[in-house]
Amino acid sequence: MKKITLALVGSLSLFSCCADEKKSDLTADQISSSNIASLSEQAGFVALLNGDSIEGWTMKGSQAEFTLEKGVLKGHGKDLKGNSFLCSDKRYTDFVMAFQMKFDHMKGNSGCMFRANIKESGRVFGYQCEHDNTDRSWTAGIYDEARRGWIVPVKKDPSPEAAAARKAFTEQGQRLFKKDDWNTVVIKCVGEHIQIWLNGEQRVDYKDMDKKNQTSEGIFGFQVHGGKSCDVRWRNIFIKELK
């Protein structure tokens, strides 16, 4: 596989931004399957992963297999005893991140960590945009990995209101999620405000007011969940940092 350096990616992205300053600037809610591949032409967006090189990314946790070929990141795990994450070396604060994901089969579990951090033990923790291939269909919900558990929707709340919210979240997810095709996910973080869209429809509009656990800065991490089997792919992975 031909390798490219992060410096080259940054240079190309900067050139694209300067050359296309007059193009309309897509907002997070406007990103869809029809325009995500052309985000590099939008001012401020750069590719997080491109070509065949995963330079600038480090695997944490269990040893899954991550490969990048022609811009498609593949994660594979078999009989993993714990979760595995391909983590960005760079840290991010406020941003719009967009990517597409799909499962190769309806087994295992996955997700995309954002504003995540790493404990001294090496354990990755923090916000995760869930990739759920079960009938529950909570893809694009927020799971707080190795910390608080489910945030959106709230899983532990037994109240009728929370139960109704979980039911509605499942019904929306079952309608939106494509089991046999690519799914477009957009994550926007500004301060404590987190928003997530799945295939053009908003799934999360949440403000984390938990001062003990709210995280304003961290890394990205693509997850291969521990267990018997997991095969997942990501592509068209872009970010626009917000100043």
Image (cartoon, rainbow, N blue to C red):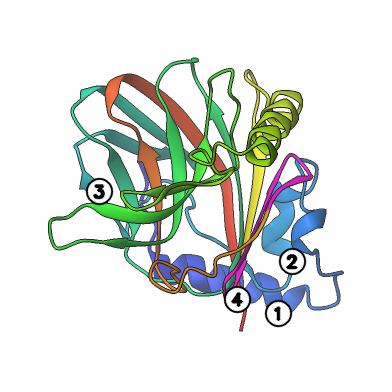
Q: Are marks 1 and 3 in contact (CB under 8 Å)?
A: no
Whether residue 139 appears in this view of the structure is: yes
Q: What number is the disc on residue 14?
A: 4
Task: Tell me the SS state at disc 4.
Answer: helix
Decide whether the magenta segment is chiefly helix, strand or loop: strand
Q: Which residue is mark 2?
A: 42
Q: Are marks 1 and 4 in contact (CB under 8 Å)?
A: yes
What amino acid does circle 2 point to?
Answer: Gln
Q: Which residue is mark 1?
A: 18
Q: Callout 4: few (<14), some (14-19), or many (20+) C-alpha neighbours within 10 Å?
A: some
**Residue shown at 87% from the left, 69% from the top:** 24
Q: Distance between the Cα atoms at labels 1 and 2? A: 10 Å
Q: Are marks 1 and 2 in contact (CB under 8 Å)?
A: no
Q: Distance between the Cα atoms at labels 2 and 4? A: 11 Å
Q: Distance between the Cα atoms at labels 3 and 2? A: 30 Å
Q: Distance between the Cα atoms at labels 1 and 3? A: 33 Å
